[in-house]
Structure formats: C-alpha cells, structure tokens
Amino acid sequence: MRRIQFYGQQIKFPSACAYCLKTVHKEYNFEQVFTYGRRSIILQLPVPLCHYHFQQASAQSPAQLWSERLGTAGGGMFGLTVFFALLNYWSGTQQGFYVSNLFLAFFIGSSMAVIIWAIAKFWVAPLFAFRETKAVLRSVQMKKFDPTHQILEIVFQNETTAELTVRENLAALITANENMRQYFISAHLVDEDIRWSGRIDTNILLDHSPSQQEAEQLLEPVIERFMIQQNGTGTFYEINDIKIMAIT
C-alpha cells in the first residue's frame, strides 16, 4: 500500500489495469464524497481496468441495489416531508412571502433528500457489495482532498501501479525534496521466450544522477507491466544499452 499526494484532480494513469497491470479494457469512475461543513464534493477518478476487473467493479449485489433504492426512496420521502412541514409552519406563523417560502422549502427539502441519497449510495450500499467488487474498488482510494489548494491524496494497493502513476504525473507530484530533477531512462530489452526485442523507457524524479545499476532497478516497474501484458512473467530477459538523460 502506498499513499501519494497530487496537485489537482486530473490524474494520469499508466496504460495498465490498476488492479493487476494487464491490458486496459475501459476506464471505471471511482467516486468519493468529501464533506466540508454543509458543503459536499463528489470526486470522480477515471481508473483504467482490464475487462475482468472492470466487470467486477461494475457488478452490484442484490443487497447493494436494494440499499440504493431504499436510500433514493427514503431521501425523496424525507425531502417531501421537510418541504411540506416547512411550508405548513411558515404558513401557520405567517412568516415571509409564499413564493419565497416555496423556493426556500424546496431548496432545503431537496438538499436533505440529496444528503440521504448520498449516504445510502456512497457509504451504506458499498458495505453490501460483492467481496471481489470491494477488492477492486479499494485498489485506488481517494482519501483526502483539499479544495483550497487542490491537493488530492490517493492510496494505491498495488505498489507497481503507484510507482507508474507517479511517473505519469511528475509535474503534479507533491515531493518533500525541492532539489529533485527529472531524468529520462531507456534501455534495450531482449526476451527470447516471448520473442521480443525493443526499447523501454521511463521518467523519474531524483535528487542525483542514477548509476547504471540504479537505472536498471528503476526500470523494473515498467518491465513488470510489460511482461504481465505480454504473458512473459517469469521468463528470462536481458537489459543492455542503458541511457540516462537529465531533463532541464
């Protein structure tokens, strides 16, 4: 598990399933509600998933569906109750004007309905999701969001996905070391078992120029993703012609 902070909400993900690193089928919107006093923000994060894990993320158990429906119905009924109760109270006490009271009661009633619906959808219903669905949706979790400074904190369950996502968002990455510099690393990869030969590369932030050995280690997440997608996991490969270039 790895916790990373980014500036902004436009996070770029690597071309790999966030759960298993296999070939991407489709993006799934991971959602999270953040509440600040009376104000709530619903964030959506398009996360790439393979076909199997996209289906798992999309699946809804019967209990989950019913809890969402009950939340929608309960929210609507409670909102209507608040709406008519406020109108009746203001009418009986002769407060304000009818038209303004009507709009204010509608606003308060609909707000209460939305709050109950959001609680049911984003907090209660997920508790009844399938175990496999919960596992996929926990792979990338938005934990904190600072709307003032636009800082989003994300927790990744897959360390390789986390590292590759960091490298896709170097400009938006919040780092503790201000002396970091961007480096471009590439190498020639040969794997006779899967009959592949070509170059792989990555961008990385470091506070020093990496050695050849360090560069090879820094390429490992990229190689892992490639091997998983090429069904070459566990095969023998060779790395040579490593090149390191500092980016100003």
Image (cartoon, rainbow, N blue to C red):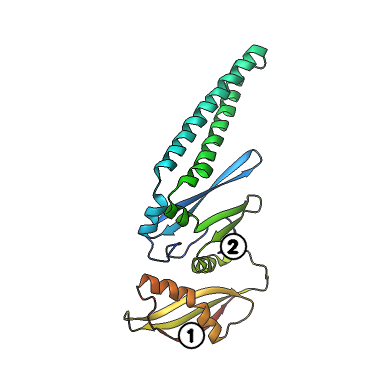
Relative vertical location of residue 71 with respect to residue 141 in this rendering, above or below: above
* Whole-percent x, y for residue 136 in the image: 45, 56
* 182 relative position to 236: left or right: right
Residue at horizontal 56 percent and vertical 77 percent from the top: 183
Relative vertical location of residue 31 with respect to residue 13 in this rendering, above or below: above
Residue at horizontal 53 percent and vertical 69 percent from the top: 163
The answer to whether the residue labelled 1 contacts the one labelled 2, judged by CB atoms less than 8 Å apart, is no
* Whole-percent x, y for residue 72 in the image: 47, 34
Residue at horizontal 40 percent and vertical 45 percent from the top: 61
Relative vertical location of residue 53 with respect to residue 240 in this rendering, above or below: above
SS for callout 2 = strand
Residue at horizontal 66 percent and vertical 50 percent from the top: 148
Residue at the spot of label 2? 3
Residue at the spot of label 1? 242
SS for callout 1 = strand
The crowding category of the residue bearing disc 1, from other C-alpha atoms within 10 Å (few below 14, some 14 to 19, many at least 20), is: some
Image quarter (top left, top right, bottom left or bottom right) of the N terminus: bottom right
Q: Of the residues shown, which amino acid type is indicated by label 2?
A: Arg
In which quadrant of the rendered view does residue 223 lie?
bottom left
* 66 relative position to 144: left or right: left
Q: Of the residues shown, which amino acid type is indicated by label 1?
A: Ile
Q: Residue 207, which numbered label?
A: none
* Whole-percent x, y for residue 214 in the image: 55, 82
* Whole-percent x, y for residue 40 in the image: 59, 42
User: Would residue 94 be seen by someone viewing this image from the given angle?
Assistant: no
Q: Nearer the viewer, mark 1 or mark 2?
A: 2
